Structure formats: structure tokens, C-alpha cells
Image (cartoon, rainbow, N blue to C red):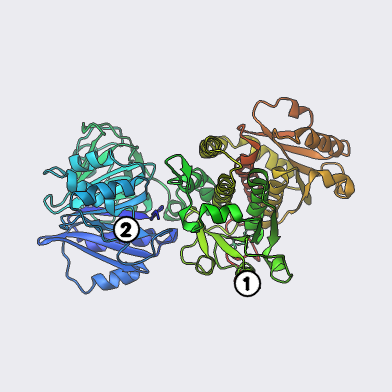
Amino acid sequence: MPQYEIMCGIVGYTGESKAQKVLIEGLSRLEYRGYDSAGVAIQETDGIHVICRKGKVAELAHTLGHFSLTGTCGIGHTRWATHGKPSEVNAHPHTSCDGDIAIVHNGIIENYAELRDELAIRGHVFTSETDSEVVAHLIEDNYHGDLVEAVRLSAMRLIGSYGIAAVCEQEPGIIVATRKDSPIVVGYAAGAEGGAGAASAEAASSASARNGAGAGAGAKAQKGVRGSFVASDIIAMLDSTRDVVVLADGQIAKLAPDGVEYFDMQGKSCEVTHTHIDWDLDLAEKGGYPDFMLKEIHEQPRVIRDTLAGRMVGGALVIDELDLSPEELDLTDRVYVIACGTSYHAGLIAKNLIEAWARIPCEVEVASEFRYRNPIITPTTVVVAVSQSGETADTLAAIRDARVKGAKVFGITNVLGSPVARESDGVIYTKANKEIAVASTKSFIGQVVSLTLLAMLFAQAKGKLTTPQVRLLFRELADTADQVERILSDTDAIRDAALACKDAESALFIGRGIGSAISYEGALKLKEISYLHAEAYAAGEMKHGPIALIDEGFPVIAIATKSPTYDKVVSNLQESRARGAKIIAIATEGDEDIKNYADYVIYIPKVRDAFSAITATVPLQLLARFVAIERGCDVDQPRNLAKSVTVE
Ligand code: M6R
């Protein structure tokens, strides 16, 4: 089974101060991201010392207090596991066989199994369940006296995403870092007492000159320690320096106590761009975004990519964690998706896909209802429990009930080892990473992508989709990451629409098919964070009641993307507009006609209808946020709501 690491925290320091203290401070800064274990590797005169602890950074700090480590160079990590239990063995740093090389890694090494087999033949012995450990052994294998070269050669073998920092016993005081699709930030600090680089440098692009002597790039003296820093998040070094280099994919940084050199993947010195950070700490924790909700909305392309990573093996879709054979999948003749709130809406989308692709009847039910009725369950029934937190009381009770009645239960959750994970027969972890804003955004996208994979898996096992069809769908699903990025790059139309409905007392969201499921999520987001009353309806229901609500200026938000029912949705818009509704349409790029029926059009890229939930939900999340901010609401912590609902 793949043992993925996702979006954990990296820090590294080399300088004049004790690394132990600097690393612990840096790791503490990263705590808000969520993690389950932490560790450091510190270069001492007698070799590299690695100390890891399950649990909090404070526990690691306490343990370190028992040692008298005085080294001034080291790397540290906070790990938030999704596969491979939280444990000291799985915690980073990982080391090579002889312990001469230690690494920390964020991301997913997709070809780790292949590399591990290859390295095992050459005598490497692996001790953890992680994909990351292979990186330490690969670097060891490529090491012939030059750590930069060893990291470069190793990176060229890696498939997947990675931010890596490595130290080597033979090169005291040196840290080498590189990245692909996972952030790595490098900085140099002249320290409070100033220094060579402190006074001289201007923030500017520079070749591989050492930071302290040129690429010092505005490394003005500020409180904190002197030396070079690497981290996965600027926040970890902000106390010491605000002048940083955000490594580009394929760049390598060689950190020394007096500065940093940069190389490209050909091993040549390269230009880098220096950036001065002027955010305060609060803003930095939010990655420069004004609130966690916006930060998390912007993380969604990454969530899509991480959720899909490693799922297509040799042209076939693989979800090993479910532990179901193709025969068992094929025998499944009824699926229930049980969940609450936003997770329930992800289930509504899954129903469309499971029924359309796999032709299995699928019911989606609010867990608080499911648990109190007597649903039809047989040994060939599969229950899918969806829960971001993995501890929602009603969802848990429904899981227990379904298992007693003989169903196989699969959890889809964001939290490793959560009750939903523990009490299910199999589990898929969404790769959203810790979600802090109460309103779910990125975890919803992770759930939808995971459920889409599940629908494809059922269809593959039942022979309803051919292998080429599965591959095509998978490719298009992967493309949604770029499409979401495009939506996030220009939000002016969404803001305009938000300004148009910020003073409304109520709003209606409509759509058909998957569009109706998206409408429910759009309405929930709006009411949760802006306290504006919002309802969602399948658009075909308009004439059966909700149209009575419409009067002059009443906002109707419609999912009017190109779909088999597009014309029907347009008819619903016309009948609403005729009664004075202010229409905001989420439409497909290139659809000029929609402007005839809508007051505001928010265009999104064209995707297959099956994937429209991923793209069309994003503008609705932003719309809700813009409205909430206009109304002066706290978007991260809306009144009366808690992040996990652990009571009935
Ligand atoms: O942790 P869960 O996914 O089980 O939580 C379910 C709901 O409480 C949750 O989705 C809630 O509706 C969110 N606040 C929605 O933004």
C-alpha cells in the first residue's frame, strides 16, 4: 500500500546558533498546519543525531532537553500522516543505511516502490512505512563527495511532488534543498548584530553569489539568529529574516552558515528571485491570505493533484486502501453515502457518478436520518461514510449501525486515525491537509475527487467503463487542477456578483443534475458565513413552490454550465427573470448566449459535466466569502458553528 506524506512542515538552519533551538522555534511556527509527529536531525561532531517524537513539538523539545546537542546545523520536520501510522519510525528525518545522510521531505514520491525495490537489491535496508525514506537512500546511493550533486541526481529519479532538505555527515554546516510541486523557501539572516550582508545588499535577483555577500539581498539585521534557513513556509524563518527566495521547481539551494548558493537541475549556478516579506505573523500563518478560508480555497488545485497522485498504476485505477477485490466491487449492488453538511453534498455528486458510470443504485442520506430508520442492507451493500473531521457523531453512529446490519463500510475522511477511519472496513484519506476555517472548502473538493475515483473504480470493476475510458476520465479529472487555478486567478466577476447580492435578505441557488448538488453546497456556504438566508432547489422544482419567493431584485444564483439540461436551466432563468429576479449565472466559457438571461455571468472553464462540481463550486465558495466580508462577518469562525460536531 502506498504510504504517502502530504504537506507537512520542513525547517532547516545552519549558522552560529544552536540548531536545536532554531529548529524547535521554526517547527512551533508550523504547528497551526496540523501534524502528528515531529523530529530533528542535528549535525554534531560525532555524526548526525536524529530525534523524533510522536505527538507535539513541545514533546520533542522536552526530549531534546535530555541531550546536550550543541550543533549549529540541522533539519526538522512536522509530519501529518495520511497513510502509514503516526509513529517515531515513520516520523522524519529519515536516514540512509549508515546514518550519514538525513532528509526531510514533503510531498508524495509516486515511484517510491520501484525505487525502493531497486535500492534494496543494492543492499539498502528500509525501516519505515513511508515513501520519504527512499529519498535518503537514493541520495546515499548517489553520494560521491558532493551533496548538491547527489541531491540533483536523486531528484532526477523522483516522480511525484517533493520539497526536500538534506544534510550529510561528510559536509558539516551544509544543507541542500530542492523542490518540485511542494514549496521550499530559503533565507539568509545577518542577525541582530548585523554583518557583511546586512548592510550591503539590495533586494534583487542575483546569480549564485552567497547570500551573505550579495544575494544577501536585503538581509537587513533584525531580531533573530544569524545564518541560513530553509523551510516549507516562510513563517518558520520570519523572526530572523524577511528576505527570502522561493525556490522554483528544479532549483537546488546549498545553504552554508554564511550564505546560500543556487543551482539548476543541470548542476549550473542559477539566477533566483529575492522577495521581501512585509506581512505580519498573523498574515504569514495564513500564507499571506487575509483569512484561512481564502488560503484553503487557493489550496484546492494542490488537493486535486495530491488526491490523484499514485492512483493510476500501469494504466489502471488503484485504491488499495479499500481492501476490496475486483470481484467484491463487482458484486456490490447497492451503495449508500452517509454524511452531514458539506460532506453530504459531496455524496450527492457521487450519486450522479456512481449511477451513471457503474450503474449501481446509490442513495445519499443525511447520517442523522439514516441511523434512525431501517435501511435495506444486504452483504452486497456498500456504505460510504464521508466526514472531513472523521468524528461527526451522527456519521459515526450511522457507520456502527450499518456494520451491525452487515454492510461493508468505507470511510472518506481527512483525519488519519479518526474514529471514522478506525471504525470503517476501509478508508480513503482525502489529501486536503488540516482545514482550519469552519466552512469546508478544500476538504469538499478532496471528497468529491475521492468519490469520483470510487465511482470510476466501481465502473472499472463492473466492466461498465473500459480501461481507455477510465484513463481518459482520469486525465480530464487531473486537468481540473489547472482549471481551478484559472478560476482563482481572476475573481473580479465573482466580486461584482457578490456586491450585487450582499444586501439581499435571501437568495436562491438552482441547478439540475450535478448542478443541483452544487447549488446545495453554494447555499450552505453563503448561509454559514454571511448569515444571508439561502436555499437551494433542483431548478425543475421552481414552479412547484420556490418561484413564489421571487420579486424585484431577488438574487437567483444558477449553475448554468453546458450540460444535458442546460436549456432547461435557461428556461428556469427566464421565468425567474420575468418576475424581477437578479440572475447570477455560473456558465461555461464561450457561452455568450447566457448573457441574454443573466445580470451577472461568472465564466468557468469547459469541463465534462461529471467534473463540473469541482470547477463550479469554487466560484460559489468565493461568492459566499465576498458577501460575508462585505457584511462584516468573520469568515473563518462563523457564529454558532464548530469545526467538528461530536454531539448529536
Ligand atoms: O467533519 P464532517 O465532514 O463530518 O462535518 C460535517 C459537517 O458538520 C460539515 O460539513 C459542516 O457542514 C461544514 N461547516 C460545512 O462547511
Q: Amino acid at mark 2?
A: His
| Closer to the camera in the image, 280 or 340 | 340
Element type at mark 1: helix
Residue 187, disc? none
Residue count near mark 2 (Cα–Cα under 10 Å), binned few <14, some 14–19, many ≥20: many
Q: Nearer the viewer, mark 2 or mark 1?
A: 1
Residue 195 can be seen in this image: no
How far across and down, in percent of the image, does residue 181 sit?
Answer: 39, 42
**In the rendered image, which quarter contains the C terminus?**
bottom right
Distance CA(mark 2)–CA(mark 1): 36 Å
Residue 77, disc? 2
Element type at mark 2: strand
Label 2 lies in ligand 1 vicinity (Cβ under 8 Å): no
Compared to residue 116, the image places residue 336 above or below, namely: below
Residue 397, disc? 1
Residue 338 relative to residue 567: left or right: left
Residue 235 relative to residue 533: left or right: left
Q: Residue, x 37% and y 53% (percent of image)?
A: 235
Ligand 1 quadrant assignment: bottom right
Q: Which of the 4 quarters of the picture holds residue 97?
A: bottom left
How far across and down, in percent of the image, does residue 160 sit?
Answer: 37, 43
Q: Which of the 4 quarters of the picture holds residue 95?
A: bottom left
Q: Residue, x 36% and y 55% (percent of image)?
A: 9
Residue 232 relative to residue 486: left or right: left
